């Protein structure tokens, strides 16, 4: 399963808000065997959002969109997703019931909110509402596009309700080596060509080792690729800790 992530918001592009949603979603999806093929951040531009949603919905198995839900003028994601599928906006009675219940449950210390519950519960016609247990604005599913709020707490709670709908066959294992990156290029190329696996090499300058991520579509292929790496270069299954006073790895004389 290949999935694209769209994170929406001017504040993300300006650096005013750290985009933790993209990395959190990518990690959760990867854990489920999904291949995350795109992570794109775009502004609160209704036409641009609609274009990217339309393109990605055709190109990938699923699209996850976060951000731009709510009642402020820059919250245009729901409208844009409706545009992408040429759908009208309608009030979801299921979402409306939850919005009203959430408002009724607010403690007396919270000031009265000047908002229209029906506006909060508006989603594209024919879409499946995703109820928001941590906030007001619901998400929705339109065909293969999943729309979530950008507030991390709300996103995480809502994603948990649909996580089972994302699955894939990708499996991975991490290995660690002190071999210089340039010295192991031929071995990494062999893994890619002979074992139908991919190897990402990520140098960690502070730890003075390279982290290798081996990915395949099944456990047997992954095991063979990792075994080849173990035979060709010195690797460890855990990060290599170093005694900086002695200048070598723990356990070495």
Image (tube, rainbow, N blue to C red):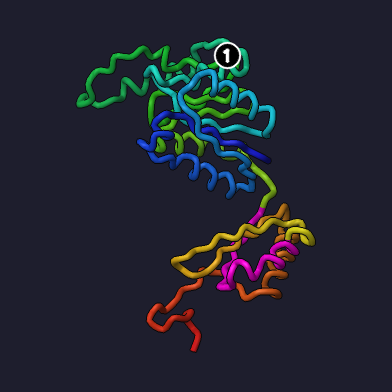
Q: Residue at x 44, y 81 (%)?
A: 247
Badge 1 crowding class, 10 Å Cα cut-off, few under 14, some 14 to 19, many 20 or more, is some
Q: Is residue 106 left or right of residue 99?
A: left
When the figure is inspected, residue 134 is found, relative to residue 232, above or below; the finding is: above
- Asked whether residue 236 appears in the rendered view, the answer is no
Q: Give residue 168's quadrant in the image.
A: top right
Front residue of 142/247: it is 247
Q: Give residue 182's quadrant in the image.
A: bottom right
Q: Is residue 16 left or right of residue 212?
A: left
Q: Residue furthest left?
A: 109
How many numbered circles are shown? Answer: 1
When the figure is inspected, residue 98 is found, relative to residue 247, above or below; the finding is: above
Q: Is residue 202 magenta?
A: no
Q: Residue at x 68, y 34 (%)?
A: 61
- Asked whether residue 216 appears in the rendered view, the answer is yes
When the figure is inspected, residue 233 is found, relative to residue 64, above or below; the finding is: below
Where residue 120 sits: x, y (%)? 41, 17
Q: Residue furthest right?
A: 194
When the figure is inspected, residue 100 is found, relative to residue 163, above or below; the finding is: above
Segment tinted magenta in the rendering: 171-191
Q: Give residue 10's quadrant in the image.
A: top left
Q: Residue at x 57, y 15 (%)?
A: 83
Q: Secondary structure at mark 1?
A: loop
Where residue 130 sits: x, y (%)? 51, 27
Q: Residue at x 52, y 11 (%)?
A: 90
Q: Which residue is mark 1?
A: 125
Where residue 226 sits: x, y (%)? 68, 66
Q: Is residue 188 left or right of residue 142?
A: right
Q: Is residue 19 left or right of residue 85?
A: left
Q: Which quadrant: the N terminus?
A: top right
């Amino acid at each position: 399963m290949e999935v694209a992530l769209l994170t929406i918001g001017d504040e993300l592009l300006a650096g005013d808000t750290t985009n933790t949603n993209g990395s959190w979603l990518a990690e959760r999806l990867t854990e489920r065997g999904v291949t995350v093929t795109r992570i794109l951040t775009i502004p609160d531009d209704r036409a641009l959002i609609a274009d990217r949603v339309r393109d990605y919905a055709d190109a990938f198995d699923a699209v996850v969109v976060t951000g731009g839900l709510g009642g402020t003028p820059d919250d245009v994601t729901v409208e844009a997703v409706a545009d992408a599928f040429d759908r009208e906006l309608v009030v979801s009675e299921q979402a409306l019931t939850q919005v009203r219940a959430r408002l009724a449950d607010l403690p007396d210390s919270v000031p009265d909110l000047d908002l229209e519950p029906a506006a909060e519960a508006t989603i594209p016609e024919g879409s499946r509402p995703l109820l928001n247990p941590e906030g007001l604005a619901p998400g929705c599913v339109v065909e293969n596009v999943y729309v979530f709020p950008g507030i991390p707490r709300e996103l995480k709670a809502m994603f948990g309700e649909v996580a089972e709908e994302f699955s894939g066959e990708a499996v991975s294992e991490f290995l660690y080596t002190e071999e210089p990156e340039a010295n192991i290029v031929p071995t990494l190329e062999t893994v890619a060509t002979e074992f139908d696996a991919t190897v990402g090499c990520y140098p960690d300058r502070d730890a003075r080792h390279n982290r290798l991520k081996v990915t395949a579509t099944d456990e047997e292929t992954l095991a063979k690729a990792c075994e080849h790496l173990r035979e060709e270069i010195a690797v460890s299954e855990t990060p290599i800790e170093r005694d900086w006073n002695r200048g070598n790895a723990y356990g070495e004389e």
